[in-house]
Amino acid sequence: MDLVELLQQAQRLTNETKMDTEMPGVERTMSQVLQATQELHSRVTQTGTNDLQAHILLGSKGVDLPQLTQKLETLSARQSFEPLDPVTDTDVQGYLKNERENAILSVIDETNRSIFEAVERQKWRCVYAEWGEEKESLLNALVGPCQQDFPDVQRQLVPTAMADEPTPYSRLNFIQQLYAKQIVAYNESHIQGTQRANLVSTFARLAHDSFDDPLVAEMWSVLEFMAGVTPLSRNIDPIQSRQTAPQFVQQARTYLERRYKTYMNKVIEQNLVAARRGGIPAVYNLVGSYVGVTFQQPQSLYGLHDVNNGRPLWPLVYYSLRSGDMGAAVRYLKESGTCPDLLKLMTLQKTAAGNRDTSTAKLEGQLRLEYNNKLHVCTDPYKKAVYVIVLACDPHDTHAELMRSIDDFLWMQLSILRGQDKRDYNIEQLTYGGLQSLILEKYGENYFNAREKTPLYFQVLALTGQFEAAIEFLARTEPNRPHAVHMAIALNELCMLGAPSSAKQPLLSCEPDDPPPMKRLNLVRLIVMYAKCFEQTDTQQALHYYYLLRHFKSEDGGNAMLNCVSDLLVENCDDQMLQLVFGVVDEANSFRFTGGIFAEFHTMDYDKYALAGMVGDELSRRSNYEAAIKLYFIAGQLDKALRLVCSLLSQVVHQPPRPGSMRERLSAVTRRLDAALAERKTDVEAHVIVTYTVLSQVMEFFDLHHAGESRLALEILANNRLVPANSSEVDECVTNLKRMGPEIIKVLPDILLAAMDIVYQEYVNQRGSSGAGSVYGEDAKSENKEAALRHLRGRAKALTNMAASVPYRMPATTNQRLVQLEILMH
């Protein structure tokens, strides 16, 4: 039975049971009425009046309210305007509606955009117009009317004078000049063999006396103190030595302890009445006065244990240790009579100087057990700190109540350092490498706000023995880079700077065998980066900085200093720079140069002549042959110079002379080489000399040819047997040509064309004259005109035959020109 049939049946039953008379009323007792009322009240209070009325109202209309509520909950309102939903292709009405709404929205959006752009353009147009008016008014105000009374300012011509040889302006600032002066003096003392000064101490004094910057002076003070250890050997790796030697930890602690004693003295001087200073000047009395000043108020004594002569005991012991005086701390404990085991251990540590025996280890174990059981939650922070320092335990306790500065934190960490002892394998301890990792990696630059507190972060890294990372961080900023460079130089001269095995490494790197987190600083890269900025204006100072790299190897395995100087000369290879570096030619010996900056470094294994040859090779590889010839001449390598000169002459020897051209410059070079060959001809191979001599003669031939001196030009060709005078000499000239170098073969086409031009010009002159004034002398004068013309045609034929006989491929234009001129002569 479906629902429709059920509904029809219900309606039929209703009609059948319907009666004309009303139903009799139902009578209820008071108890029944009360029960019905309570049931109705309970239903109303459970579902709520609003829900009940809603169910009654919507139920009478045939609406299922629970189902409708579920459907409404699944709906979500749109949070912003979104593109209209796409419709299917079959929904034509929806598609048209969607397109219409999209068109309206696009028009509105385009209108808004155009209005905004128009307003923006109008705004800037008004701004520019107002600024134009303002400029015009300003100019008018500056000029002003003629009737205004302006002060009469007389213009005076100030004479200026310029030096005959002006020098470029130095790019070194005041601080860099002071540093460079000390570097030059240091290198000179090394070259002269005298005792060299400690550069760290020298720069530290310079910073205190000449730099108006206390932060820089403080950084140098830290570095000087940390470098004041036993000098190391160059055969020992600085990184490995620094990680295993305990003196660096002791140096850092001592520096922090001295600085804290200075601070306590200042506090006492400001509170002399409360300090009640007296007695023998010593740490014992200093700490007593300081504690008296610090703990004046009663509330400052809250939570502290034990008292010694009216003052809290454990602050006295702690500040004695903080000042680096174990004896004063032992004295305070002995006077108080407390903690005999701790007193005994401190006495043993004071006398044993860091050496641990069996009794000391046993006593430490007992005190550690006492600390873990009782003192770990002690309310006296000074007592806890004393136990932690003496026992070197609990490295994770921050001791926040006592850490008032980074110095306190660093000193505390340095005080609880211990080398890894096999007997204490089950005890958690802080090692030197662990502290370095804590500072550099876990906390890092962000924790210390290193960008704004650069000196502070540098001091923290330096005090933990991380010189390389500290210098690299300092070198990142332009104002601090000069200090970083000279700190690295000073440490390297003391064999305390870790350098990478290869100059190719970045500025900061690490080797596979280095203990973490230690880094290595590429000093070669740092100095080159620094000196490149002023090597062109302050060449002497730059060379002294490069001299510091004489013990380093460059990327190609050569000397780093020579490579740096070579790069400088390759990039600035003018006559002034060459004279500055190598000096001037000695009048007595053209192969000897006197003076020059590089001559100062005479203690090196390389002299300036080897450097000149090295620079010449590099210039030759870069195809800067003219500059390479100058360097080869300075180096005395005439063979290489002649080879380059021959190569260049073969390219320009046929050109007409022009002022300033390469041909004119090579003419000056050949004159200088001719004078040099007269002295050292044996140093050059024979075939190179032959090629150079022939090319010099060919240059002279072309000079005469372009000047119109045909007779002298032909005499040069005849003397060198380069071209035949008749057909019988062709084979001899070809054979002679095969023995010459490729440079002569390269210029042969131009020689043949020039010789043919001379013959043709003579042929033309002979045909238009009686033969007088011929370039062939008295023999030609005695012959008649026809014989002279026949001789010239034979010579032209010989030139053409030679061009066809040489075992080289002649240019097609050369052959065409030769044949053309020969045909014109028949």
Image (cartoon, helix red, strand yellow):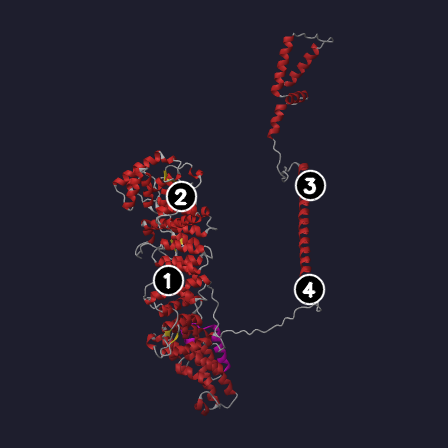
Secondary structure beneath disc 2?
A: helix
Q: Position of residue 780 (x, y in %)?
A: 45, 89
Q: Foreground mark, 3 or 2?
A: 2
Residue shown at 49% from the left, 85% from the top: 762
Which residue is under mark 1?
A: 548
Residue type marked 2: Val
User: In the rendered view of the protein, which quadrant contains the N terminus?
Assistant: top right
In space, the residues marked 1 and 4 are separated at their CA atoms by 62 Å
Which of the marked residues, 3 or 1, is nearer the chain's N terminus? 3
Residue type marked 4: Asn
Which residue is under mark 4?
A: 140
Which of the marked residues, 3 or 2, is nearer the chain's N terminus? 3
Q: Foreground mark, 4 or 3?
A: 4
In space, the residues marked 3 and 1 are separated at their CA atoms by 81 Å
Secondary structure beneath disc 4?
A: helix
Residue type marked 3: Arg
Q: Magenta part mainly helix, strand or loop?
A: helix
**Is 113 placed above or below 548 here?**
above
Secondary structure beneath disc 3?
A: helix
Q: Is residue 435 left or right of residue 755?
A: left
Q: Foreground mark, 3 or 1?
A: 1
Which residue is under mark 2?
A: 291
Which of the marked residues, 1 or 4, is nearer the chain's N terminus? 4
Magenta residues (range): 804-826
Residue type marked 1: Leu
In space, the residues marked 1 and 2 are separated at their CA atoms by 51 Å
In space, the residues marked 4 and 3 are separated at their CA atoms by 60 Å
Which residue is under mark 3?
A: 100
Q: Is disc 2 in contact with disc 4, using a CB cutoff of under 8 Å?
A: no
Q: Foreground mark, 2 or 4?
A: 2
